[in-house]
C-alpha cells in the first residue's frame, strides 16, 4: 500500500465569469468557477430574490450574512442558475445547505484523479456514486453540469431523495444522467445500493462528521462564537443539517472505517473510492482502516475554502497498470 499527498497546483485560471470578479480565491481549484468574489449584481439579475439578503459588509463590499441560512440558500439558488443553468433548487427547512464552491472543488479534484487513468484528460463518460446525496443533490447536479458525468445518488432518507428528485425533474435532461436510490439500511453503505454487475469509476461522500447530537451542537456553538454571534441566540448552522447528515455513532472516523471495510467487496468494480474528511484527527484511524483493507494506493488531497480546511481521502484496490487499463477500457 502506498500513499501520496497531493501537491496543490496553481495554474492560471480561466477568464473569470459567471458571477465572479477578478479578485481570486487562490485556495480553490484552478477550474473552480468561484475563485473570484461573487458578482452580486449579476447574481441578482439571475435570481432577484437574492437582493433582499445583500448589503455592504464591514469593508464596504457587497456580501450576505453567511450566518443566515436563508441568505445562504438564496445565494446557492443564484449561483446554480447563473453558473450551472440549474433552476428550481431548494431544500426543506433544516436540511443541509452546502457551500457551492467547496462542493465544486471536491469534484474538480476527483476529475484530476480520473484523468490520471485517461492520458491526462478528464473523462466525460465517468460514472459516479454519491453516498448520502441529501435533499440538496449538489454533487450530481454540479458534476453533471461541469463534466457531463452520470450519477447514482443514494440516501437513507426518503424525504431527502424526494426533494432531490424534484430538482432533477425540474431541469430537462438531468433525469437521464442522475438516478436516485434509497439505502434501506442505516448500517450499510455500498451494499444494497450497488447492483449486481454494476461498475463505477469513482465514489464520493460527505460523511456525518460528529459522533453525537451533543457534539454537533457544541460544534455549532463554537462556530457561532467564532462568527461573533451572541450566545443568547439559539445556535443555528449557516449550512443547516440534521440527524444523519451531521452525526453518527463514532463520527466520521467510524463511518469512513465502515466504508473502507465495505469497499473491499467491490474492489474490482470501482477505480477510486473517496470521501471528505473534516477533522485531521480522524486521519490516523482512516489510515489504519486502509492498511487493514490492503488497498493498493491511497491519496490525501488537501483543500481549503476561506479559513476552513478539509481534505479528501481516495483509495483504490487496483495497481497502476490496472488503473491504466481501466481508463483504456472505459474511456479511450
Image (spheres, helix red, strand yellow):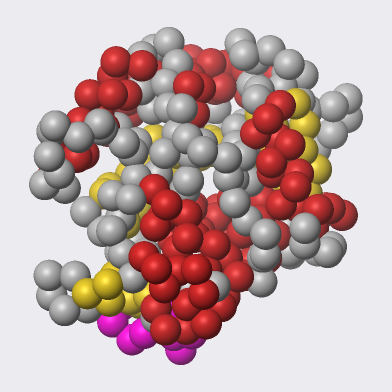
Examine the rendered structure and indicate whether residue 196 appears above or below residue 56: above
Query: What residue is shown at x 72% (from left), y 22% (from top)?
Result: 183
- Residue 123 seen from this side: no
Residue 75 is situated, as x and y percent measured from the top left of the image, at 45, 63
- Residue 70 seen from this side: yes
Q: Nearer the viewer, residue 292 or 104?
A: 104
Does residue 123 show up magenta in the picture? no
Query: What residue is shown at x 63% (from left), y 56% (from top)?
Result: 89
Q: Look at the image and tell me in which quarter the C terminus lies.
A: bottom right
Residue 59 is situated, as x and y percent measured from the top left of the image, at 13, 75
Per the rendered image, the range of residues in magenta is 15-25
Query: What residue is shown at x 41% (from left), y 73% (from top)?
Result: 51
Examine the rendered structure and indicate whether residue 35 appears above or below residue 295: below
Left or right: residue 241 versus residue 184 is left
Examine the rendered structure and indicate whether residue 34 appears above or below residue 312: below
The picture quadrant where one finds residue 54 is bottom left
Q: Nearer the viewer, residue 297 or 138?
A: 138
Query: What residue is shown at x 47% (from left), y 54% (from top)?
Result: 73
Residue 50 is situated, as x and y percent measured from the top left of the image, at 45, 69
Examine the rendered structure and indicate whether residue 172 appears above or below residue 238: below
The picture quadrant where one finds residue 12 is bottom left
Give the number of marks: 0
Amino acid at each position: 500500500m502506498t500513499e501520496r499527498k497531493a501537491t496543490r497546483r496553481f495554474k492560471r485560471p480561466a477568464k473569470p465569469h459567471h458571477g465572479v470578479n477578478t479578485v481570486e480565491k487562490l485556495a480553490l481549484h484552478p477550474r473552480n468557477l468561484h475563485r473570484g468574489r461573487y458578482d452580486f449584481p449579476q447574481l441578482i439579475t439571475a435570481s432577484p430574490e437574492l437582493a433582499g439578503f445583500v448589503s455592504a459588509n464591514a469593508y464596504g463590499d457587497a456580501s450576505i450574512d453567511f450566518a443566515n441560512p436563508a441568505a445562504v440558500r438564496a445565494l446557492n439558488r443564484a449561483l446554480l442558475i447563473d453558473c450551472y443553468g440549474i433552476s428550481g433548487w431548494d431544500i426543506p427547512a433544516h436540511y443541509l445547505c452546502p457551500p457551492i464552491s467547496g462542493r465544486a472543488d471536491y469534484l474538480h479534484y476527483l476529475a484530476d484523479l480520473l484523468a490520471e487513468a485517461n492520458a491526462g484528460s478528464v473523462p466525460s463518460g465517468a460514472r459516479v456514486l454519491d453516498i448520502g446525496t441529501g435533499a440538496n443533490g449538489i454533487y450530481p447536479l454540479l458534476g453533471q453540469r461541469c463534466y457531463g458525468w452520470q450519477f447514482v445518488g443514494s440516501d437513507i432518507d426518503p424525504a431527502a431523495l424526494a426533494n432531490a428528485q424534484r430538482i432533477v425533474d425540474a431541469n430537462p435532461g438531468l433525469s437521464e444522467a442522475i438516478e436516485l436510490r434509497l439505502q434501506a439500511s442505516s448500517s450499510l453503505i455500498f451494499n444494497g445500493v450497488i447492483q449486481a454487475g454494476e461498475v463505477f469509476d469513482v465514489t464520493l461522500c460527505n460523511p456525518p462528521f460528529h459522533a453525537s447530537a451533543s457534539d454537533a451542537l457544541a460544534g455549532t456553538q463554537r462556530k457561532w462564537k467564532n462568527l461573533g454571534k451572541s450566545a443568547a441566540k439559539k445556535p443555528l448552522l449557516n449550512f443547516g443539517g440534521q440527524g444523519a447528515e451531521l452525526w453518527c455513532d463514532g463520527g466520521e472516523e467510524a463511518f469512513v472505517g465502515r466504508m473502507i471495510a465495505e469497499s473491499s467487496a467491490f474492489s474490482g468494480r470501482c477505480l477510486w473510492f473517496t470521501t471528505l474528511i473534516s477533522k485531521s484527527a480522524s486521519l490516523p484511524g482512516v489510515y489504519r482502516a486502509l492498511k487493514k483493507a490492503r488497498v493498493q494506493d491511497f491519496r490525501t488531497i488537501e483543500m481549503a475554502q476561506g479559513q476552513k480546511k478539509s481534505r479528501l481521502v481516495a483509495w483504490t484496490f487496483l495497481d497502476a497498470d490496472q488503473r491504466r487499463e481501466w481508463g483504456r477500457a472505459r474511456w479511450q
